[in-house]
Image: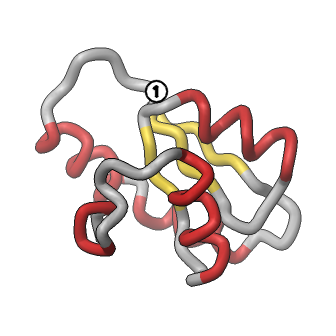
C-alpha cells in the first residue's frame, strides 16, 4: 500500500506515522526522518528504512522481495522497531 492509496501522499510525516500506528502498518521509507522517529518513539508503527542511494522503484521492489522473510520476522518481533535494509 502506498501513502497515496489512503490520501496521505502530501501529508506530513506525523500524519503518516499516526495512520500506520492506528492501522497496524509498517512504514517502508528511504527517508531518515522515520528511522529517527522510530528510535526516539519506538513502535508502533515499525519502520523499514531502505538505505539505498539513487535507485529505481523496481530496485526497491526487488530488495523488499528478496528480504521478505527478514521483514516478516521483524514484524513479529515484540522488541524491534527499526529494520535497516541496504
Q: Toward the viewer: 61 or 19?
A: 19
Relative to 40, is 67 on the left or the right? Answer: left
Instruction: In this rendered view, identify the residue nearer to me: 36 or 14.
Output: 14
Q: Nearer the viewer, residue 5 or 68?
A: 5
The relative height of residue 23 versus residue 71 in the rendered view (above or below) is: below
Query: Would you place residue 37 above or below residue 61 in this image?
Result: above
Q: Position of residue 80 (x, y in %)?
A: 80, 57
Residue at x-position 54% and y-position 46%: 13
- Above-or-below relation of 47 to 85: below
Within the image, what quadrant is residue 36 found in? top right
Give the image location of residue 7, x and y in percent.
30, 68
Q: Residue at x 74, y 46 (%)?
A: 38
What colour scheme was applied to this rendering of the protein?
A: secondary structure
Residue 61 relative to residue 76: left or right: left
Crowdedness near tag 1: few (<14), some (14–19) or many (≥20) residues, C-alpha within 10 Å: some
> Residue 64 or 25: which is nearer the viewer?
25
Residue visible at 16% across and 41% down? 57
Q: Is residue 30 left or right of residue 7?
A: right
Q: How many marks?
A: 1
Q: Quadrant of residue 8?
A: bottom left
Residue found farthest to the top? 53
Q: Quick one: quadrant of the N terminus?
A: bottom left
35 up-or-down from 80: above or below: above
Left or right? Give the position of 13 relative to 5. Answer: right
Q: Residue at x 41, y 63 (%)?
A: 68
Which residue was labeled with disc 1?
51
Q: Quadrant of the C terminus?
A: top left
Secondary structure of the residue carrying tag 1 is loop
- Image coordinates for residue 41, horizontal then vertical, percent: 85, 50
Amino acid at each position: 500500500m502506498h501513502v497515496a492509496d489512503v490520501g496521505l501522499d502530501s501529508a506530513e510525516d506525523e500524519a503518516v506515522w499516526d495512520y500506520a500506528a492506528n492501522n497496524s502498518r509498517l512504514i517502508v521509507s528511504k527517508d531518515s526522518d522515520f528511522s529517527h522517529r522510530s528510535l526516539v518513539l519506538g513502535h508502533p508503527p515499525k519502520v523499514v528504512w531502505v538505505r539505498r542511494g539513487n535507485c529505481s522503484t523496481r530496485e526497491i521492489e526487488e530488495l523488499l522481495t528478496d528480504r521478505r522473510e527478514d521483514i516478516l520476522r521483524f514484524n513479529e518481533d515484540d522488541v524491534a522497531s527499526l529494520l535497516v535494509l541496504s
